[in-house]
Amino acid sequence: MIFYHTFEVRWSDLDANKHLANSTYVQYCAQARMAFMTKEKMGVTQLSRWGIGPVILHERYSFFKEIYADQTVIVSVEIDGCSEDSSIYRFLHKFYLPDGTHCATAEATGVWIDMMIRKMTTPPDDVVEAMNKYKSPETVVLSREDFKKFPFHPHNIDPAEFNK
């Protein structure tokens, strides 16, 4: 299954080049995910009751066609990858115009965290069931090992470097 969420591009969604701003792509993906989660009865209120929250660890984008003010944009939500227990997930988002033109693709990998201890957790069965509905035969199984494939990793430095 694929979930679709529709946006009307506003003036404030544009950048200096008068097309959809990079930051707006991020916001549209986040809002499409929240609309998906609300539809599947895992919105903000329910997440608070469960004491969990979704955290995005890595996002990447590819852009194919510009999107302008006053256009309608449809953003898809698909489960592209998921761990066996659904604690790790990867959403795939595609940006379409109403005529079906594919304008961009985004991928967002994240985890569910326990809001009290701020650590990764396995979500409740309701979340697992909802996510399973949106998996396809192409959905890959993810594990913590996949985090090592991210292009960036933390490298702490000596704070004295800031004052040179």
Image: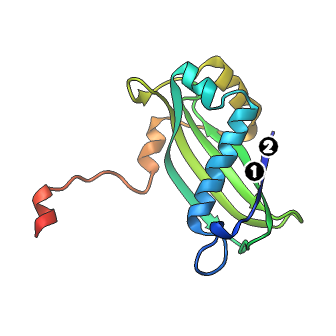
Question: What residue is shown at x 71% (from left), y 41% (from top)?
Answer: 35
Question: What residue is shown at x 79% (from left), y 48% (from top)?
Answer: 4
Q: Can residue 92 be seen in this view?
A: yes
Q: Which amino acid does label 2 sit on?
A: Ile
Question: What residue is shown at x 72% (from left), y 44% (from top)?
Answer: 78
Q: Provide residue 101's location: percent of width, then percent of height.
A: 83, 67
- The residue labelled by disc 1 is 76
**Is residue 144 shown above or below 75?**
above
| Helix, strand or loop for disc 1 | strand
Q: Can residue 139 be seen in this view?
A: no
**Is residue 68 shown above or below 137?**
below
Q: Which amino acid does label 1 sit on?
A: Ser
Dot label at residue 163: none
Q: Is residue 132 left or right of residue 122?
A: right
| Helix, strand or loop for disc 2 | loop
Q: Provide residue 57's location: percent of width, then percent of height.
A: 47, 46
Comparing 51 with 63, the one in front is 51
Dots 2, 1 in contact, CB < 8 A: yes
Comparing 26 with 10, the one in front is 10
In the rendered view of the protein, which quadrant contains the C terminus? bottom left
Q: Residue furthest front?
A: 11
Q: Distance between the residues labelled 2 and 1?
A: 7 Å
Dot label at residue 2: 2
Task: State which tag comes first along the sequence, 2 or 1.
Answer: 2
Q: Provide residue 49's location: percent of width, then percent of height.
A: 57, 19
In the rendered view of the protein, which quadrant contains the N terminus? top right
Question: What residue is shown at x 49% (from left), y 50% (from top)?
Answer: 58
Q: Is residue 84 left or right of residue 105?
A: left
